[in-house]
């Protein structure tokens, strides 16, 4: 296994996902010799916590020398990744990047450990591994075992994505607007294109020429790259007034027959999946209940009688954990165990 402990850098250490990465590295007792917190020049000198008793002083990413650093977990925005990740990779550090910048690069593996961990081997081309979009990750954790069983032809997904997907400022905007509604203040819109409190917004990221948004496009192309290029995907991505955890209503058409009971049995054994599915109010999961949890929760598994071999289901997961930080740390664990 090579050396037993690794020097790990966390880029974007002061952001919501960066903090979650530090906490998960500590929680899962990833074998670290040293942990470096990196962020922009403005944040350098600030302190972030690591585990229960350690405090790290944030260093400036732009001047940090990656030589001798083994693994870098990064969540600091696509432009920043585009700039520093190749530099870190050339210095011999493997970057696990949480932004969208490298995901569709043919030389960069796009990894969900429960789905395609064998593709990690391709990291040596650039020393970069990409973490998929949060909504793609939870969907594919649930769909991979079903694809293995009955071969997916087509996916129709509508997402209900929490504000934390847009970072701390987005969560703050939900909080401030909610408060403003109650005290009859003017509503300020800075992060979202429309009011988010007591509302839903069918736009995440920018619009593309074909009418889809960038977020919807990400789900479509990432599913093909990770799971199977033949799968057809159409997505509608919606921001909802929830702080943490994304939910998805997923409709799947298979090539081969699969019943709801069979799907349930398969998912109960699947890694990373927790099935909570019976016909009562405590028989399904909502985003508020899974915040802080690691699993991908699947409920309301039922047959779609309008197509041959169709199933519908409800998938919920904490987007900061499995949708981002946890997935990145799990990639690092695989990397350390099998490759470094």
Image (cartoon, rainbow, N blue to C red):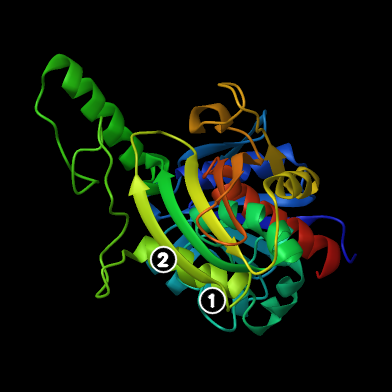
Image quadrant for the C terminus?
bottom right
x and y, in percent, of residue 306 in the image: 50, 56
With respect to residue 319, does 98 lie above or below?
Answer: below
With respect to residue 212, does 186 lie above or below?
Answer: above
Of residues 104 and 13, the one drawn nearer to the viewer in this rendering: 104
Residues under labels 1 and 2: Cα distance? 15 Å
Of residues 224 and 108, the one drawn nearer to the viewer in this rendering: 224
Q: How many marks overall?
A: 2
Q: How many C-alpha atoms fall within 10 Å of the one at disc 2: few (<14), some, or many (≥20)?
A: some
Q: Is residue 225 left or right of residue 121?
A: left
Instruction: Provide the residue designation for mark 1.
Output: 87
SS for dot 2: helix
Q: Earlier in the sequence, mark 1 or mark 2?
A: 2
Please give the name of the residue rendered at 38% of the width and 61% of the height, measured from the top-left corner: 215
Q: Is residue 68 left or right of residue 229?
A: right
SS for dot 1: helix
x and y, in percent, of residue 48 in the image: 53, 38
Residue 87 in view (yes/no) = yes
With respect to residue 332, does 127 lie above or below?
Answer: below
Residue 66 in view (yes/no) = no
With respect to residue 327, does 162 lie above or below?
Answer: above
x and y, in percent, of residue 58 in the image: 51, 47
Camera-near label (1 vs 2) is 2
Determine which of the numbered discs, if any, sits on residue 328 in the image: none
Of residues 97 and 292, the one drawn nearer to the viewer in this rendering: 292
**Circles 1 and 2: CB distance less than 8 Å?**
no
Determine which of the numbered discs, if any, sits on residue 78 in the image: 2
Please give the name of the residue rendered at 10% of the width and 22% of the height, measured from the top-left corner: 185
Please give the name of the residue rendered at 46% of the width and 36% of the height, measured from the top-left corner: 244
């Amino acid at each position: 296994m090579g050396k037993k402990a690794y020097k790990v850098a966390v880029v974007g250490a002061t952001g919501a996902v960066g903090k979650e990465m530090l906490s998960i590295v500590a929680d899962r007792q990833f074998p670290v010799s040293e942990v470096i917190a990196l962020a922009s020049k403005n944040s350098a000198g600030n302190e972030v916590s690591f585990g229960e008793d350690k405090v790290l002083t944030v260093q400036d990413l732009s001047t940090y020398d990656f030589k001798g650093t083994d693994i870098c977990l990064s969540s600091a925005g696509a432009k920043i990744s585009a700039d520093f990740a190749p530099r870190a990779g050339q210095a011999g550090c493997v970057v696990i990047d949480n932004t969208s910048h490298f995901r569709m690069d043919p030389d960069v593996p796009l990894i969900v450990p429960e789905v395609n961990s064998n593709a990690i081997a391709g990291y040596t081309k650039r020393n970069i591994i990409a973490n998929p979009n949060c909504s793609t990750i939870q969907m594919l954790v649930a769909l991979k075992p079903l694809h293995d069983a009955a071969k997916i032809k087509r996916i129709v997904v509508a997402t209900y994505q929490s504000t934390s997907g847009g970072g701390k400022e987005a969560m703050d905007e939900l909080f401030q607007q909610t408060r403003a509604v109650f005290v009859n203040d003017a509503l300020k819109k800075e992060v979202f294109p429309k009011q988010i409190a007591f509302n839903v917004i069918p736009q995440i990221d920018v619009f593309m020429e074909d009418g889809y948004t960038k977020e919807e496009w990400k789900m479509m192309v990432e599913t093909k790259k990770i799971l199977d290029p033949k799968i057809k995907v159409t997505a509608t991505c919606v921001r909802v007034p929830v702080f943490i955890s994304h939910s998805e209503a997923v409709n799947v058409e298979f090539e081969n027959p699969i019943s709801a009971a069979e799907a349930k049995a398969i998912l109960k054994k699947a890694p990373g999946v927790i099935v909570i599915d019976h016909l009562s109010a405590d028989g399904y999961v909502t985003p508020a209940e899974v915040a802080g949890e690691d699993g991908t929760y699947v409920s309301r598994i039922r047959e779609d009688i309008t197509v041959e071999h169709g199933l519908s289901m409800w998938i919920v997961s904490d987007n900061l954990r499995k949708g981002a930080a946890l997935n990145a740390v799990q990639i690092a664990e695989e990397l350390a165990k099998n490759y470094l």
